[in-house]
Image (cartoon, grey):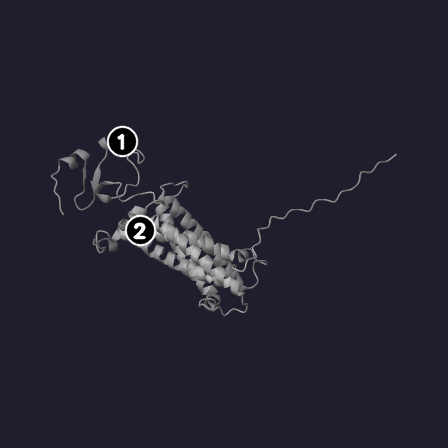
């Protein structure tokens, strides 16, 4: 006697598909509106980053021509750099949310222009996320990567700038079509979408404002009262200079001070110990 077990249908294979967003705000108009703010934030962050880098690592041909006044200039540019970088994190998240359905469009490549567009998007997203994430971790003095932060951050900044220019060049027709208040696209969205878009943009602006207000006080001292999220405070340090880390955290010990030397390069190089420096005459200038 033969017994046959009943056959059960095989479970369907689960495909790892990204979630689908079908809201009316995932459109070119919203992406263009947020992209304008994001472009300005990246531009200011890039320009102030160049100032910071070349003031700290000036090339030989520029070292004697860099200005030393005003004394608060570097604090201003560095404060703008940090503030616009943090604002760019919020704007980038909103921008990615707005264009999310297009990131996984199928087929991935339909033409040469479409291939260039996808390449510019991939390069822009990867470099921008890397740049903002590493910059954020640098603010809190946490370096979980094996490479040196400063040269890599400087190099990737040029990649981000180039990818933004490439993206603008490829998407110029679509950006121009959705730049003004009235979109010239072929698809007219219902009136409630315009209201939702304004709400989204107002909420994004409010989030950027809160992040900026609670962090920029570490460099822009009139707002130091609201310095809640920044890792440093302008009043916590000598001469109003924020302290990045304590001596113990920086590895400075009494034994290290005994062997420490200040080496001065030049036509007549020399070295000074800490005792030599303490023995030198002091003067105060106001």
**In the shown orientation, is residue 258 left or right of residue 158?**
left
Mark 1 or 2: the one toward you? 2
The disc placed on residue 193 is none
Instruction: List the residue tagged with mark 1.
Output: 253
State if disc 2 and disc 1 touch (CB < 8 Å).
no
Q: Which of the two labelled residues, at mark 1 and mark 2, occupies the earlier sequence position?
A: 2
**In the shown orientation, is residue 71 left or right of residue 95?**
left
Residue 261 drawn at (x, y percent): 22, 36
The disc placed on residue 79 is 2
Residue at the top extreme of this rendering = 255
- Give neighbour class at mark 2: few <14, some 14-19, many 20+ (Cα, 10 Å): many
State which quarter of the image contains the N terminus.
Answer: top right
Residue drawn at x 54%, y 65% as measured from the top left: 190
Residue drawn at x 26%, y 43% as measured from the top left: 235
Residue 175 drawn at (x, y percent): 46, 65
- Give neighbour class at mark 1: few <14, some 14-19, many 20+ (Cα, 10 Å): few
**In the shown orientation, is residue 71 left or right of residue 34?**
left
Residue 45 in sight: yes
Residue 55 in sight: no
Total label count? 2
Residue 118 drawn at (x, y percent): 51, 59
Which of the pair 229/167 is nearer the observer?
229
Kindly indicate the quadrant of the structure image that contains residue 254.
top left
Residue drawn at x 47%, y 66% as measured from the top left: 178
């Amino acid at each position: 006697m033969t017994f046959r077990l009943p056959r059960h249908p095989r479970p369907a294979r689960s495909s790892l598909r990204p979630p689908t967003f079908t809201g009316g705000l995932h459109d070119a108009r919203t992406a263009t509106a947020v992209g304008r703010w994001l472009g300005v934030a990246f531009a200011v962050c890039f320009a102030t980053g160049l100032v910071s880098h070349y003031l700290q690592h000036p090339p030989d041909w520029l070292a004697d021509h860099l200005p030393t006044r005003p004394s608060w200039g570097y604090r201003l540019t560095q404060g703008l750099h940090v503030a616009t970088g943090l604002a760019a994190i919020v704007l980038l998240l909103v921008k990615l949310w707005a264009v999310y359905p297009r990131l996984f469009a199928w087929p991935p490549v339909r033409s040469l222009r479409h291939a260039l567009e996808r390449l510019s998007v991939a390069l822009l997203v990867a470099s921008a996320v890397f740049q903002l994430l590493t910059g954020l971790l640098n603010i809190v003095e946490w370096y979980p990567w094996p490479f040196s932060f400063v040269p890599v951050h400087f190099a990737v900044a040029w990649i981000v700038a180039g990818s933004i220019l490439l993206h603008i060049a490829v998407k110029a027709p679509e950006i121009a079509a959705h730049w003004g208040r009235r979109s010239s696209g072929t698809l007219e969205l219902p009136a409630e979408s315009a209201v939702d878009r304004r709400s989204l943009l107002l909420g994004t602006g409010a989030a950027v404002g809160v992040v900026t207000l609670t962090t920029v006080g570490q460099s822009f001292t009139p707002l130091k009262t609201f310095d809640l999220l920044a890792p440093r405070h302008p009043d916590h340090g000598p001469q109003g200079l924020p302290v990045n880390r304590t001596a113990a955290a920086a590895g400075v010990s009494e034994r290290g001070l005994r062997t420490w030397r200040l080496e001065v390069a030049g036509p007549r190089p020399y070295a000074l110990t800490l005792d030599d420096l303490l023995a030198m005459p002091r003067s105060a200038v106001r």
